[in-house]
Amino acid sequence: HVQAQRELIVELGDARAFELMIKHREWIDDAVAGEGGAVVKSASGSTLCAFDSAAAAVRAAICLRTRLADESEPEQSMRRLDVRLAVHQGPAVAATVDGRLDYFGLTVETAVDLIAFTTPGQVLLSAALADDSETIAELTAVGHTLTVHDLAGPLGFGLQVTPARGSDIAELS
């Protein structure tokens, strides 16, 4: 999710801000496709993606976070996008609406709700992923740190992922 979209448009103008948003979307597409996922919905600065596994979703989120934080990236403005990343898993209703595949239901709404609890550059996992021992084992095996955060209401708690310094995201498989 991109929080600072309006501020960028005001500061950079429509054309330059649009260029940054297109570049950001390309980065999302690369990270998602690299893990076998698909972008299924975009609206108001948010992008919803679907993956075959929670581990693949987490790898894509960490990959995107790492790229956005890369000091050697020539597109310095990308770091000003205030990107917030959240991962949730669960069943969803998939339907073709107006000729396009779309997803609906509590899982989708929970994923969107998680964004309100993230900070820029953070990867937040829902409590549902805390029960996914395979994903948690993969994250900790490559040195990523998981920190429990209390969340308001029905979300309960989340796990913040802090990638290991110098870790190669490809090691998480």
Image: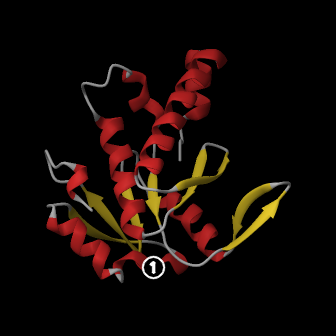
Residue at image coords 45%, 41%:
30
Q: Position of residue 81 (x, y in %)?
A: 47, 34
Residue at image coords 14%, 61%:
143
Q: For mark 1, what is the residue?
A: 156
Q: Is residue 65 left or right of residue 84?
A: left
Which of these two is toward me, 115 or 142? 142
Q: Is residue 57 left or right of residue 39?
A: left
Residue at image coords 46%, 50%:
32
**Structure colour scheme:** secondary structure
Kindly state the secondary structure of the residue where label 1 is placed: loop
- Residue 76, quarter of the rendered image: top left
* Residue farthest toward the right in the current orientation of the protein: 98
Q: Quadrant of the C terminus?
A: bottom left
The residue type indicated by label 1 comes to Gly
Count residues near mark 1 (Cα–Cα under 10 Å), then give few for <14, some for 14-19, many for 20+: few
Q: Position of residue 28 (x, y in %)?
A: 48, 42
Which of these two is toward me, 27 or 123? 27
Which of these two is toward me, 76 or 100? 100
Residue at image coords 58%, 61%:
112
Placement of 126 over or under 15, stated as above or below: below
- Residue 157, quarter of the rendered image: bottom left
Q: Is residue 88 left or right of residue 10?
A: left
Q: Position of residue 4 (x, y in %)?
A: 53, 36
Q: How many marks?
A: 1
